[in-house]
Amino acid sequence: MSTTLRTVQFGNTLIPFGVAVSPRRETIAITVKPDMTVRVVTPPEATPVIVDRAVRGKAEWIIEQWDNRRRMNLAAPRQFRSGESIKYLGRNHRLRIRRGSPASLRLFGGAFEATVPTNESAHATRERLAQLFQDWFREHGIAYLTPLVEHYGGQLGIDIPPVRIVSMKTRWGSCSAKSIRLHWQIMMAPRRLVRYVVAHEVCHLKYPDHSRPFWRLLERVMPDCHQRHAELAVLGPRLSL
């Protein structure tokens, strides 16, 4: 069955869903898949108006399923021990810790190599490593993300303000006329999701809300933006230190 992508608005939440028509169905079936995407299978006679109404009628249930999956995907607390895996642009890299000076962190030979003081306590070492990683992701984030911001800005003919890599509690990014701010932890995500966040924020320079014109603009730049949005919603809770 071929699938058509549609969206409905429920309060402040945009719900993207794929619609497939089946001659064997007599009623509309709505499911939330493990990757957070919403699939709707309809009988041939169901019109788009009827389908949209059915999805809005199940919107609270859909959002509840999304929330449940996010909770299930919460990352375990980071221990910062040798052998632990830490993501960079979607790939896992082993952490190797050695004692010495000065304190430092680098990505070498496919692994993160960290140097920490010899006589430091385990608690102090965890705090130091957390800061080393945050600094490392900020430094590499500005170099990696700025060209992406400029790329999408040029594609849309939008003047780009300075890019800042920051810590954010509940967002991957935000923007204003003064700056585009991106959460350093997005550098842990796969490249396709990093590009989604960047394109999303650049489009906000033209439309500061999540109105339909905003989504149309983002769809023009990135036709599968809703799929990437759903993927990030699943993976996002695991992108942390």
Image (spheres, rainbow, N blue to C red):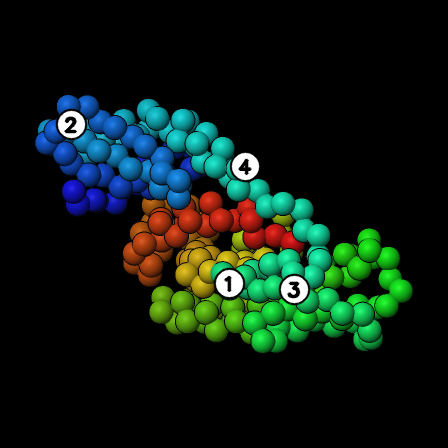
Mark 3 or 4, nearer chain start: 4
**In the image, which is nearer the foreground, mark 1 or mark 4?**
1
Mark 2 or 1, nearer chain start: 2
Image-based side of 110 in relation to 4, left or right: right
Residue beneath disc 1: 91
Q: Tag 2: residue type?
A: Arg
Crowd rating for badge 2 (residues with CA inside 10 Å; few <14, some 14–19, many 20+): few
Could you give the CA–CA distance between mark 4 and mark 2, rounded to whole angstroms?
Answer: 33 Å
Q: Which mark is residue 71?
A: 4
| Location of residue 53 in the rendering, given as x and y in whole percent from the top left corner | 27, 27
- Residue beneath the point at 61% across and 64% down: 94
Q: Nearer the viewer, residue 190 or 120?
A: 120
| Location of residue 112 in the rendering, given as x and y in whole percent from the top left corner | 64, 68
Q: Tag 1: residue type?
A: Arg
User: Secondary structure under badge 3?
Assistant: strand
User: Secondary structure under badge 4?
Assistant: helix
- Residue beneath the point at 30% across and 56% down: 223
Q: Tag 3: residue type?
A: Leu
| Location of residue 9 in the rendering, given as x and y in whole percent from the top left corner | 36, 36
**In the image, which is nearer the foreground, mark 2 or mark 1?**
1
Q: Nearer the viewer, residue 211 or 83?
A: 83
Q: Which mark is residue 95?
A: 3
Q: Which mark is residue 25?
A: 2
Mark 1 or 4, nearer chain start: 4
| Residue 149 in view, yes or no | yes
| Location of residue 72 in the rendering, given as x and y in whole percent from the top left corner | 53, 37
Crowd rating for badge 3 (residues with CA inside 10 Å; few <14, some 14–19, many 20+): some
